[in-house]
Amino acid sequence: MNQQPENAASASADIIERTVLTRAALRRNRPAPTGSTAVVYLDRHGRLYLAHRPLTAAEAYLTTPREMYTVDTSEHPVTVELDLPTRQEVFSFHATVHLSWRVLDPIAAVRSGLADPKPIYTPFLEQQLCEIARAYDTDQNAQAERDMNAQFAGRIVEIAQGLTFSRFSARLSLDGSTRQYIAEQTYADRKEQRRQRERDMNIRNATRDLDEIKAHHQVRELEAQYQQQLAMLEEKHQLAVEQERMAFYAEALRTDQLNLIALRLSTNRDDVNDVINLFMRQRQLDFDGARGVVNALLEQKLVNRSDVTDIMARATKVLADHISGTPFSVKAGEGTVRELQPGSSQPRVDATDLEDDDDDDDELDDDDQPG
């Protein structure tokens, strides 16, 4: 930083005022230190000492100091402008630093011949702040500013020649070209972030739509499975109900409890056709059993003419009792069982067949008799 040359005598007069003493002068004026000034004496032996009170008349007469220095010890606020490097080095921070300097050690200031404090505190500040600023990028001026203030704010920092500074406050800014560069970089970053957000949003929307489609398909599959299971359960239930009804009718038919069947049908009229079919099957079984017995007796020749009438009467009675309403009819008076359905595979039984069999039996009996 370029500094304008200053008159040393005038600068020294602003901070340190030197006075050659005589006894006569001390009799007229013996200055005392105040809150903003300090008095330093140079004794006859060339030693400097700080006065804490005015000299007494004896001290002024017997040990008259050779020189007196009145030192300004008040605070002086100043503003310092500095250009600080960044981490990239090609860019820089512009620092505006506010502080207050003062003389803390008047003897050191007098001994060093302090004239202008600016060439003393400015290089010190520049060195300290450059070390901090180089740790930050160009767009991190706020962080660098906080670090500088945390380093020096609220402290009394000793420099040299009895000087200190306090009340430190730094503000960092950027030059025009640096601000333009950062602005362009920021705009580019924001544009890329906006594109990234839009891309992420599109991906999320597509994923959400796909999840909704999958969920819809799963719901439809579950509904189809539910309907299928429901239909199976309904079919199973209907079958169980049907089996229960038919078991009831079959048991009532087996025990010949027609009143129960009639009572049940009075409240379940849709069962009439099934009950009729059940009656038909049951009567058909009884008819087939009776006819099988007759045919077996005939085939085994276990009946003769005297037995046929009684057997046929009993069989005819069984058939007559059980085949009413079936496609068969019985003529009990003629002793004939006739099958009225054409094309039936069941055998026919009539009285002629039985009489022929009896004749054969008689012939066999005659032959078997001894001559």
Image (cartoon, rainbow, N blue to C red):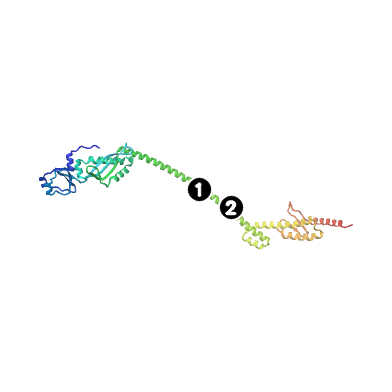
Is residue 87 positioned above or below 52 on the image?
Answer: above
Residue at 50%, 48% in the rendered image:
216
**Element assignment for label 2:** helix
Looking at the picture, tell me which residue is in the foreground, 358 or 173.
Answer: 173
Looking at the picture, tell me which residue is in the foreground, 42 or 14.
Answer: 42
Which residue position holds label 1? 216
Image coords of residue 179 (percent x, y)? 31, 39
| Residue 65 falls in image quadrant | top left
Which residue position holds label 2? 232
Dot 1 alpha-carbon crowd within 10 angstroms: few under 14, some 14 to 19, many 20 or more: few
Image coords of residue 155 (percent x, y)? 26, 47
Residue at 72%, 59% in the rendered image:
322
Amino acid carrying label 2: it is Met
Side of 86 where 224 appears, left or right: right
Dot 2 alpha-carbon crowd within 10 angstroms: few under 14, some 14 to 19, many 20 or more: few
Report whether residue 114 is seen. no
Direction left: furthest residue: 24
Image coords of residue 81 (percent x, y)? 26, 40
| Residue 172 falls in image quadrant | top left
Which quadrant of the rendered structure holds the N terminus?
Answer: top left
